[in-house]
Image (cartoon, rainbow, N blue to C red):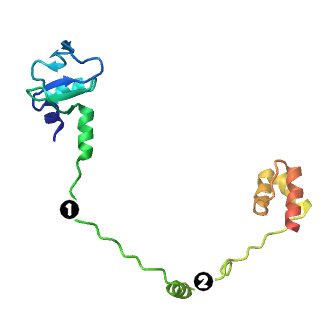
């Protein structure tokens, strides 16, 4: 049901059930009540507005309660509706795990030994004198380039040279 027809739908008489409103006579908003029942028919929009403030029910011409009114009641009514299932879902069939199939697949794959195709890189070993010359000519940046592959780190040249020498030994 479109929202506009829900809000502006049929006109009805309403009754206030809220505590303290039994026998209420007078205006509430634009609706006139006598003994807590609306004198005239009220639009669905006005009934929903009042239903958001007070407990309101729709009543027939004799004053018998028909059903609760309000936006919240519309939500409750919608929860009771169930969608039709057009087609039941098929249950997926799962094959049990077969260890033999898994073993066969693993055996088919050729597993190479690690580092088999890795080229061996020769790392030049520096003497303390060579490292001091590099430090004098190119600075700490050049020493860090030498020390990084060896995981030798320091924030000074005097600290980095002994760490590079120790890493080269070990």
Where residue 26 appears, as percent x and y from the top left, is: 18, 11
Q: Secondary structure at mark 1?
A: loop
- Tell me the tag on residue 86: 1
Q: Residues within 10 Å of mark 1 (few under 14, many from 20)?
A: few
- Tell me the tag on residue 62: none
Q: Secondary structure at mark 2?
A: loop
Relative height, residue 140 to residue 23 (above, below): below
Q: State which quarter of the image contains the N terminus.
A: top left
Q: What residue does disc 2 label?
A: 111
Q: Tell me what residue is drawn at x 16 percent, y 35 percent.
A: 6
**Left or right: 79, with 107 as reference point:** left
**Left or right: 78, with 126 as reference point:** left
Question: Which is nearer the eye, 13 or 35?
Answer: 35
Q: Earlier in the sequence, mark 2 or mark 1?
A: 1
Where residue 103 appears, as percent x and y from the top left, is: 55, 86
**Left or right: 170, with 52 as reference point:** right
The image quadrant that residue 123 belongs to is bottom right
Question: Which is nearer the eye, 151 or 58?
Answer: 58
The image quadrant that residue 12 belongs to is top left
Q: Tell me what residue is drawn at x 11 percent, y 32 percent.
A: 9
Tell me the CA gap for discs 2 and 1. 50 Å
């Amino acid at each position: 049901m479109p929202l506009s027809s829900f809000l502006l739908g049929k006109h009805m008489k309403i009754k206030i059930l809220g505590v303290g409103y039994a026998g209420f006579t007078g205006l509430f908003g634009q609706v006139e009540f006598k003994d807590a029942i609306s004198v005239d028919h009220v639009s669905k929009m006005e009934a929903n507005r009042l239903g958001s403030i007070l407990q309101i029910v729709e009543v027939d011409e004799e004053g018998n309660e028909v059903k609760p009114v309000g936006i919240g009641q519309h939500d409750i009514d919608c929860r009771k509706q169930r969608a039709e299932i057009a087609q039941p879902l098929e249950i997926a069939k799962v094959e049990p795990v077969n260890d033999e199939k898994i073993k066969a697949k693993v055996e088919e794959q050729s597993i190479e030994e690690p580092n088999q195709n890795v080229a061996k890189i020769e790392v030049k070993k520096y003497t303390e004198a060579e490292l001091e010359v590099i430090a004098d000519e190119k600075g700490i940046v050049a020493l860090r380039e030498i020390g990084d592959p060896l995981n030798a780190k320091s924030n000074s040249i005097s600290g980095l040279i002994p760490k590079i020498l120790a890493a080269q030994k070990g």
